[in-house]
Image (cartoon, coloured by chain):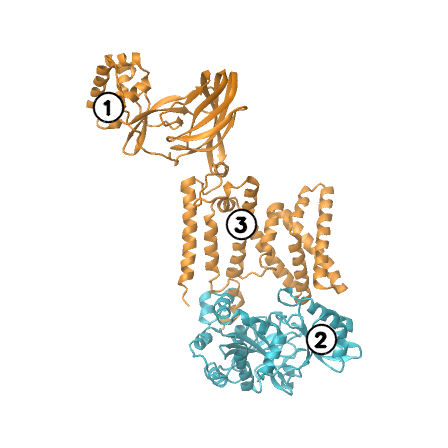
Chain colours: A orange, B cyan
Amino acid sequence: MSRLPFYLIVTLLLVAGAAMSIHRHVQFEVPWTPGELRQVWEIEAQVNFTADGGPAKVNMALPSSQQGYRILTEHTASPGYGLAFLEEEGGRRAEWSTRDASGDQQLYYSVQALVAPGARSAEIEPPPLRRDILWESPYDTAASQVIDRAWARSADHFTFARELINDFTDERQGENARLLLTQFDRTPLLVRLLNQAGVPAREVSGLMLDHGRRRQSLTTWIQVFEDQQWVLFDPRTGERGRPDNMLLWESAGQAVLEVQGGSNSRINFSMLSRNQPAAAAVRNQLADDTLLNFSIHSLPLEDQALFQTILLIPIGALVVVLLRVLVGIKTSGTFMPVLIALAFIQTTLITGLVGFLMVVAVGLVIRNYLSYLNLLLVARVTAVIITVIAIISVFSVLSYRFGLNAGLTITFFPMIILSWTIERMSILWEEEGPKQVLIQGGGSLMTAVLAYLAMNNPWIRHITFNFLGVQLMLMGLILLLGNYTGYRLLELRRFKPVTED
Amino acid sequence: MWTTPARLRAKDIIGMNRRNIRYIGRYNSRRLYPLVDDKLKTKLLAQKFGITTPALIGTVTTQFGVKHIRKMLAGHHGFVIKPAKGSGGKGILVIERVEGDRYVKPSGARLSLGDVERHVSNILSGLYSLGGSPDVALVEALINFDDSFAEYTYEGVPDIRVIVFKGYPVMAMMRLSTAASDGKANLHQGAVGVGIDIASGTAIRGVQFDRTRHDHPDTGHELASLHIPDWATLLLLAAGCYEMTGLGYLGTDMVLDRAHGPMLLELNARPGLAIQMANGEGLRSRLDLIERQPDGVPAEERVVFSQHHFARSSELRETA
């Protein structure tokens, strides 16, 4: 019988699991450890305008995920307005509309942006060059002279843009530049000149992020395209590159704010910076999950909490498999320790251990009496279940009376499992004596504690919850363990006498 | 306290994991398990194949049948009540003799009819069965074991475990009950395990609680002279269980009755590994040798093959 398919499946599971995890780490920046802090900016945009008294339409540019930042969640507050999010020509926009507005209007938009050094913007494509640029005399000659001058001193699009902007900075302004600035605004003028020279460029708006600032406005920047990349230039200094603390708000060369049916419109921004645990930052990511990055984080929060526990069960089961297959520990009921460990997570370890021992000990005494009554098995176990419930109730009430609130968590124990444990232990006691009860009970409890320690480890919780690929790897690992024909650790002791002579 | 895997391998010892995957998983088809897990089925099957088993006094299948047990037991001086689906000797009640309305266990403990009824009722409700499923109680005639073993046992019946692999007897041991094991023949409870030479049926080595022993702890009788009469018949009986069940890796438990000779007590599809301790030798190379043998060899030839290849000399005599 060939084992090749088996090893193929195991390899497939391990590789697929690892690939999924790495994909999630790289693509979504889910960190490997839970403790990492991520900086999140909360930015609020406030739009003000005076409505003319009639229908009004407000169209505002929205930021997208881009180099250095990932957009997490966004909210709007705009009572009385209809709202739509539009995707057009590489830019996201919000459109508020209302039938009847008069007086001062205020619209709010807030967004959370995660500082993510690895994030990239979605589109990289050159904009169409605007060929329809017409200059009036004498600006046409001034423009072509400025272009020729900068062209002579440049080697490519980027150096050309730098030289051109430099010619418009205060110290080096020539006559031509001064003439053009009397007629045009600086940034649109520069974009116009760049396009005139055949260089794809556009005007974009960015927000300088600074913790705690209010009533900020956007600044304009110039983006120049060459070799499949956009490079940002400061139109005031000619400095190349994006400042670290700048978020591009509008990057499609469109207007930031358009208001119909109103006047006196302005937009200003306030911002706050917060450090969030990475896991929480991940949780807030927009639910744009595709099949490939299939994730539980698209579920409602309540169900996520449920899954956090469910996804830990394989870890507990792995501990059981390791202890049974590699060590050879005897437990009472194969996966009973995992369920006890789950209860320990709710009760905390010490309370859980004390509670478990007390319930089982009292249960054993009562079960011992039940065995004299000569009952049928199912009836007897049911009687034990009711006894366990009674014990738990009494302990809860007593601990509450004594001011020990921790005692109340005892109700998290799985009662039916406890009853079967008591029943099995009791039979074991009758048949094999108290020593076996201690061995198997101790083995179960030790397994439960180890499973609890594994399942309660913050790192393991983080990994199992955020990387579903890990489940596939666990599956592969357990299949491999199921194929292990070597000795168990405790067998090295059991068979020792044979090797002695 | 601990040994190394390399030394265990040098001694041919196989571990639980290897037994489960390599032998039980490969040679024991799951659908055949009910034949051996249910002692009643085993018994009926054995009768069909002409393999001797202890006489069946009766069965109890329903709770109201428990009330008629007194009638069933009338006239029998000694009997054994056991669950059909029990495992590891659990739930076996041996009554050596009946004194008036008292049932006397080999230990001398006296039970009332009510105690016996409660035991049967527990069996029926599945207390001793695998997975706790409802069960049937078997009542069998007490075995009158061969007097030659009286010196080697305390209270219980000594039984002989033979591991049969693909129909070849590969290893054997005798289990002698002791005071420590409460008359039961389970090694982990303190019974003495005596490795038996496959060729001759004589003792090789004795262990109790995994430590070497040269005598019986209670009777003080030395083990070296232990010799099983009718050994070839017993091996043939054990080997025949392969054809009977189809299970490739099988533990057969046999007893020697004074009148009827070797008898099949029960079969086990998951025989334990303690037999390796009793023999001071692992199963691995023997199993490897059998794996290389062709199928379809008659039982007589298989027994001869095993007796030829697995002959060992006693350690007890050398050291004694």
Q: Residue at x 46, y 20 (%)?
A: A268
Query: Which residue is at the front of the view, B103 or B81?
Result: B81
Q: Residues within 10 Å of mark 2 (few under 14, many from 20)?
A: some
Residue A425 marker: none
Q: Are marks 1 and 3 in contact (CB under 8 Å)?
A: no
Q: Secondary structure at mark 2?
A: loop
The residue beneath circle 3 is A454
Q: Amino acid at mark 3?
A: Ala
Identified at 70% across, 53% down, the residue is A388
- The span from disc 2 to disc 3 (Cα, nearest Å) is 48 Å
Nearest-to-viewer mark from 1 and 2: 1
Q: Quadrant of the C terminus of chain B?
A: bottom right
Residue A91 x %, y % = 39, 29
Q: Nearer the viewer, mark 2 or mark 3?
A: 3
Residue under label 1, please give it. Answer: A197
Q: Amino acid at mark 1?
A: Ala
Q: Residue B51: percent from the left, percent from the top? A: 58, 83
Q: Which mark is residue B107?
A: 2
How dense is the environment of label 1, judged by Cα within 10 Å: few (below 14), some, or many (20 and up)?
A: some
N-terminal label among 1 and 3: 1
Q: Give me the C-alpha separation between circle 1 and circle 3.
A: 65 Å
* Host chain of mark 2: B
- The amino acid type of the residue labelled 2 equals Ser
